Amino acid sequence: MSNQDVAFNTRKLVKNLGGVRAVTRSINKFSEDEIITFIGVDKWMRRNSLPLLHLCRLAIIAKQQNHPFDLYDYISVKSKEKEDKND
């Protein structure tokens, strides 16, 4: 069992790429067959989660727009307290 929690900071990613509206427009411009709404991007931020396909698209978009993009900048690792095995 792992003693670390790993989290992805979706809010930080969206902010660094220009905010909800900019991310929505960029994704919709990138892929016209699958439309994402502002509400969809907002849900990613509230859940702190986004589909892998959209993460990959955002990485490509960031590179095309010369935005620095390093996945490690959005990952946080926190150590969990070790559980007492005598409980």
Image: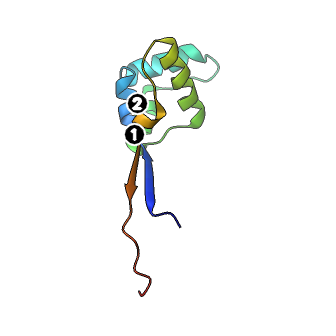
Image coordinates for residue 24, horizontal then vertical, percent: 46, 22
Q: Are marks 2 and 1 in contact (CB under 8 Å)?
A: yes
Q: Report the disc number at residue 66.
A: none
Mark 1 closeness class: few <14, some 14–19, many ≥20 residues within 10 Å: some
Residue at 44% x, 58% y is 4
Given the current orientation, which residue lies at the most extreme bottom position?
Answer: 86
Q: Which residue is mark 1?
A: 9
Q: Quadrant of residue 39?
A: top left
Q: How many marks?
A: 2
Query: Vertical placement of 55 versus 86: above or below?
Result: above
> Looking at the picture, which amino acid does disc 2 mark?
Leu
Q: Nearer the viewer, residue 65 or 19?
A: 65
The residue lying toward the viewer, choosing from 48 and 21, is 48
- Density class for disc 2 (Cα within 10 Å; few <14, some 14-19, many ≥20) is many
Task: From the top left corner, tell me how far across and down residue 19 is, in percent.
Answer: 36, 23
Which residue lies at the image location 65% right of the left edge and 19% below the top edge? 33
For the point 44% across and 83% down, which residue is it? 85
Q: Amino acid at mark 1?
A: Asn
Residue tagged by mark 2? 13
